[in-house]
Image (tube, helix red, strand yellow):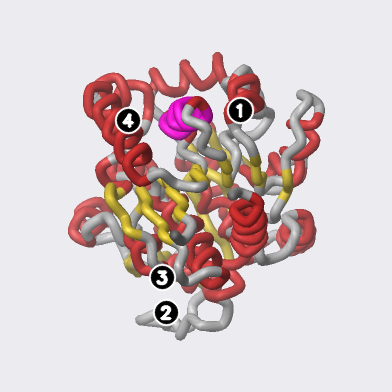
Amino acid sequence: MGKRVYVIAGEASGDLHGGNLVRELLRKDPALQVRAWGGDRMRAAGAEVVKHYRDLAFMGFTQVVMNLRTILRNMAWCKADIAAFKPDALILIDYPGFNLRIAEWAHGQGIPVHYYISPQVWAWKADRVKTIKRVVDRMYVILPFEKDWYAQRGMDVEFVGHPLLDEIDAAHGMGSPLPGDDGRPVVALLPGSRRQEIERMLSTMLTTVPHFPDHRFVVAAAPSVPESFYRGLIGDAPVDLVAGRTYAVLHAARAALVTSGTATLETALIGTPEAVCYSGSALNVWLAKRLIQVRFISLVNLIMDREVVRELIQQDMRPAPLRAELDRLLHDGAYRARMEAELAELRVKLGGPGASARVADRVWKSLQERP
């Protein structure tokens, strides 16, 4: 009988990287059976997706509490499905609140546990490392400082490089000019991917538009959010909307205003000067200040261990500071040149493309060692 692996990704980014990993695994062995929680990317790569991440995305303390019964029911169903499938390996991709509990159960069942993309234990809930050491057989990390962080706590993990490099390199040069190109320099607005976040962030970002009439503002729309939602927020402001082509928008942009998250790193790896923006609910910010143990919120600054890009958070995420920072990004040549050089250095630090292929190789070798 052929080998079997079970993969769990609970978010869009996990589905993206999981899709690349599944594709690399099946390239090594087309007979491999892959059953998964994920999305369209993993399905297209050849996995049998039994639960879509759209049904799992509960963000923030209040949403988790409100949906606790659903989360617990999903967990019980997941354990039963894994037990029935009898995989030779379980691959968990980020999504720690759910995946670490599954890892603990799977370890008890004698299933080898591979974890791709470490939970951000260095930022908060550092005590989770005790559980990880006990229940995870192999951890593959994507940020260079994570290897040392784990080593200081007695765990050997493998740095495989950042999977976003593969995505960005694959998209490079493939984008045709943006629709409606009128020769003006482009400012990209990336207000996030969830409606509540977009509503909060975009309204402030749009206040900059009247002050830069010689620039074209383009919102990079998340494909999961209807265009009508963005149109309702933009109103009659002279702002264009481009859906499903975020990398093309960033490649075309002279500068970008980006909501904190993975998009800040994508922007940096493309090489576009940016400001990182974030404004959250009072409860979530109050909790974060008491729990989070890092100096910066953006991955760009965390990886470089210094302020490379300006972070406009909470009280700084207001029209005047945002407008001043955008003006610097667009018109201060020395400031731009310094940032561009540091973004190039960041790219080198992240280890080059091929992360998913490296993880697939390690998983595959471990499967061969199993009787």
Label whose residue precedes the other's in the sequence (4 or 2): 4
Q: Is residue 81 above or below residue 154?
A: below
The secondary structure that dominates the magenta segment is helix
Image-based side of 279 in relation to 294, left or right: left
Q: Nearer the viewer, mark 1 or mark 2?
A: 1
What crowding class fits label 4: few (fewer than 14 Cα within 10 Å), some (14-19), or many (20 or more)?
some
How far apart are labels 4 and 1 at the CA level? Answer: 18 Å
Q: Are marks 3 and 2 in contact (CB under 8 Å)?
A: yes
**Where residue 119 sits: x, y (%)?**
57, 35
* Residue occupied by mark 1: 132
Q: Are marks 4 and 1 in contact (CB under 8 Å)?
A: no
How far apart are labels 3 and 2 at the CA level? Answer: 9 Å
How far apart are labels 3 and 4 at the CA level? Answer: 34 Å
State the residue in front, 348 or 15.
15
* Residue occupied by mark 2: 178
> Residue 87: within the magenta?
no
**Where residue 159 sits: x, y (%)?**
73, 48
Tag of residue 245: 3
What crowding class fits label 2: few (fewer than 14 Cα within 10 Å), some (14-19), or many (20 or more)?
some
* Residue occupied by mark 4: 75
Label whose residue precedes the other's in the sequence (3 or 2): 2
How far apart are labels 1 and 3 at the CA level? Answer: 36 Å
Label whose residue precedes the other's in the sequence (3 or 4): 4
